[in-house]
Image (cartoon, coloured by chain):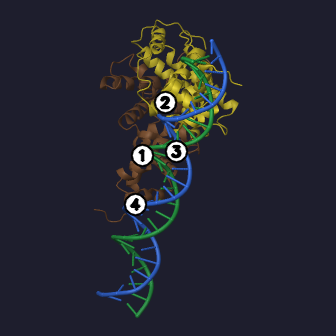
Chain colours: A yellow, B brown, C green, D blue
Amino acid sequence: MAQRDAEATKARILEAAVEEFAKHGHAGGRIERISASSGTNVRMIYAYFGGKSGLFDEALAASLGAMAAAVPPRAEDLPEWAGDLFDYHQRDPAALRLTLWAQLERPEAASEPLQSYMDKASMLSRTAAGPLTAVDLLVVIYAVAQAWQLAPLGLLKANHADPGSAGAMASYRQAVIYTVRRITTPESATPGISPQEEVQAS
Amino acid sequence: MAQRDAEATKARILEAAVEEFAKHGHAGGRIERISASSGTNVRMIYAYFGGKSGLFDEALAASLGAMAAAVPPRAEDLPEWAGDLFDYHQRDPAALRLTLWAQLERPEAASEPLQSYMDKASMLSRTAAGPLTAVDLLVVIYAVAQAWQLAPLGLLKANHADPGSAGAMASYRQAVIYTVRRITTPESATPGISPQEEVQAS
DNA sequence: AATAAGTAAGTAGGTATTTACTTATATACT
DNA sequence: AGTATATAAGTAAATACCTACTTACTTATT
C-alpha cells in the first residue's frame, strides 16, 4: 500500500498523535498506540519528532492552528464568534482538551507570547468593553465559549436529564451568545464609560 | 512518634494525595510519592482507599468539599462571590486543578448529580439573569472565576510583562467582578426580558 | 551503488498492586 | 488483676506488567 512518502507519514503520525494526546494527555498518551493507529513504526516518531514531548508539542500547535484557521476572530460580532467557538469545541473537542492537558502537564509549552494572540488582541482593541482590556476580553470569551464543556456533568444534569442532547446543546449555545452579548454591549446608564461603540446585532 | 491512629494516617494520606494529584493528575501521580510524603506505607493506601483510583476520587471530593466550605455561595452578591472564588483559586489552585484533571482523565468521577450543586442552583434560581437558568448562571460564574487561571500564559503576557505579579492579579480580579456584574445586572433598554429583578449593589 | 524510508526485536528502568510478615492495641478468660 | 488471644495497624520486599527509547537490520527510490 505504502509508497515511501516522508511528508505523508509525518502527517499521519501527527494526526494520530492529536487524537491520542487529546484523549489521554501527555503522561497517559502511549507512543506505541500512536504508531499503531498511524500505521507506522515507533522508530519513525523518534526520527521525525525527537520523542514523546516533541510530538506532543507539535500536535498541540497543529491542533491550535487548525482551530484558529477554522474559527477566525470576528471583531464586529463577538457574540457570534463565541458561538462559533462553542460549535467548534462541540464538533471537535481535541483542541480544547489538548490546551487543557498542556496547561496542566506542560505549562511551559504555551508560555511564549504567540503572535496570533497579539493579532487577535489588537483586532479587539477598538471594541473595548468598559474597563476590560482587549486581552481580558479574549480571556473571558474563550472561557465562556468553553464553559459548558468544562462544567461537571453532575451540575448540568440539574438542568437537562441528558446534558449531551441536541436540545441541551442548543441551549448552551444560546447561553454563550447571550453572555458574551451582555459583556460586550456597552452599559446604558453607567457614568465613566466612553460611549464610542456601535450596538451589535443579536 | 506514632501511636496507632487510623483516622489520622488516613487524613495524612488524603492530604498528600490532594497535593500529588493536583500537581500530576491521575496518570502522572505516583502512589509511592504519596506514601512517602505522608509518612506511611504504600500498603495503607490499598487498605484504606482500595487503590490509586479510589484515592484520587476521595482526594477530589475532599478538595471540592473544602472549597465549597471556604467559599459559600452568596446569592445576594454574585460578583463578589465570583471574586472570592477567584481568590480561592489563587491561594490554593488544588481544587481547580483536580477538577480539570478529573474532567479530562475520569469524567465519570464527577458525573453524579451532587446535592451541593442542586442547593447552589436553587439558591440562585430567584436571581434569574435574563434567559439564563440558575444552572447556566453557575456554569458561567465558575468559568469566569477561573478564566485567568486557565488562560495560556502567552496570551496574558500581551498585557502584563509578569502575568503572575500582584498588580496583574488585582486587575484579573477586577475583571472577574466586572464581568459577573455585567451578566447579572438586568438589561435596562432591551425588550423581551421580563423586568422582575431588583438591582444588586455593586 | 548510495541514500532515504521503514521495520523488527530488543533494553533498561519504572509502576501499580500483592504477598507474607511484624508490631501494637483491644478483648476475653481465669 | 494478670495473662492469653484476637484483631487492627503498619512494614518490607517481590511480582507482573508497561513504557519510552535504541540498536541492528531490510527495503525502496534515484
Residue density around tag 4, few if under 14, some if 14–19, many if 20 or more, within 10 Å: few
What residue occupies the far left of the structure in this picture? B1
Which amino acid, by three-letter code, is at mark 4?
Glu
Q: Are marks 4 and 1 on the same chain?
A: yes
Q: Secondary structure at mark 4?
A: helix
Q: Secondary structure at mark 1?
A: helix
Residue B80: give x, y in percent of width and height: 41, 31
Q: Quadrant of residue C28?
A: bottom left
Q: Residue at x 39, y 12 (%)?
A: A192
Whether residue A133 is visible to the viewer of this picture, yes or no, is yes
Closer to the camera in the image, D27 or C18: D27
Question: Circles 4 and 1: CB distance less than 8 Å?
Answer: no
What residue occupies the far right of the structure in this picture? A1
Say which chain tag 2 marks: A
Residue B15: give x, y in percent of width and height: 39, 49
Q: Which residue is mark 1?
A: B18
Q: CA distance from mark 3 to mark 2?
A: 44 Å
Q: CA distance from mark 4 to mark 3?
A: 25 Å
Which amino acid, by three-letter code, is at mark 3?
Ser
Q: Nearer the viewer, mark 4 or mark 2?
A: 2
Q: How many marks?
A: 4
Q: Which residue is mark 4?
A: B7
Residue B39: give x, y in percent of width and height: 34, 55
Say which chain tag 3 marks: B
